[in-house]
Amino acid sequence: MSFDLDWNGDKIVAALSEPFHQANEVLGREFAKEITASKWDWPNEPSPRDIVDTGELRRSYAGERDSPTEYSHAWNVEYAMAVHEGYATRSGSRMPGRPWTKQPLENGTLEKTFEKLAQAELRKLQ
Amino acid sequence: MTPAELAAALRTLLSDLLGTHRSPQGTTVPACRVGDPPADWTAEGLEVIVEREPDQANRPLQGGEHNLSETLTVHLTAHGSGSPAAAVRRIARNYPDASVTRVPANERLGILERRTVRIPK
């Protein structure tokens, strides 16, 4: 007895591409909420505070659909990594990190949103 | 492994790479400790700071179970000299599960070169 499995991988990937990108766009909005949330401990008043001074970091965000299966999130200012991870300066200051990507990633925002959207698209293929 | 235990292990592992912390009275100690030094101390060379509190992430599992993972965070900062990259290579050989991020130095903003290493407990 033999079985033939007709697996249309291209059709499945094509169907999942839009849910994947939309889930990333939801993730991008969650990142933005973290930047404006007054939850970050800071050595100077006010504390806790948000991650907005001039607004340059927040405005620098670029979410891009790089390919059907790739999406990138970037904050294109020279000090983005320093703000995210924390930094020390020549003058002796030590500033804590404010990792605005951490909570949305740990919450599984991308996976949960993708699962919900993908299920709807996969049902259409049946 | 506690933060104190990790700091002690790193003090040994990186002994020839470490810079110094200097007190206002002129006392110097190797620049590897848990938590930031007092504000009136100065750092020279490579500084290694282990954060006091581990980072925690909880993942719910089936049947009401959960998986709580803890991570120790280490900041390696070059104060004037010292190579965080060389120290990270050594740390990675001894803690192969470690992940690394980099804050590049920025002359204009006065930001020092730093690596942050996260080591699962």
Image (cartoon, coloured by chain):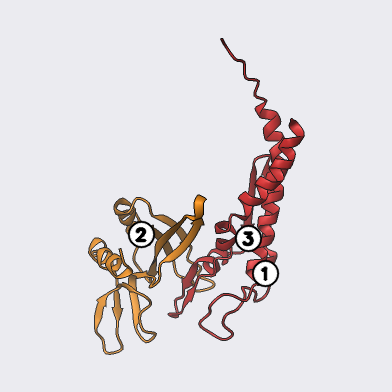
Chain colours: A red, B orange
- Residue at 42 percent across and 62 percent down: it is B115
A7 relative to A60, above or below: above
Callout 3 and callout 1 share a chain = yes
A34 relative to A63, above or below: below
Question: Which amino acid type corresponds to the residue marked 2 in the rendered image?
Answer: Lys
- Residue at 39 percent across and 68 percent down: it is B77
User: Whole-Å distance between the Cαs marked 1 and 2?
Assistant: 36 Å
Q: Quadrant of the C terminus of chain B?
A: bottom left
Give how far across and how far down residue B29 sits, in percent: 25, 77
Which SS class for mark 2?
loop
For the image, the number of numbered tags is 3
Q: Nearer the viewer, residue A81 or A99?
A: A99
Q: Which of marks 2 and 3 is in front?
A: 2
To which residue does mark 2 refer?
A: B121
Q: Nearer the viewer, mark 1 or mark 2?
A: 2
To which residue does mark 3 refer?
A: A76
Give how far across and how far down residue B59 sits, in percent: 50, 56
Residue placed furthest toward the right: A124
To which residue does mark 1 refer?
A: A56
Give how far across and how far down residue A1 sits, in percent: 56, 9
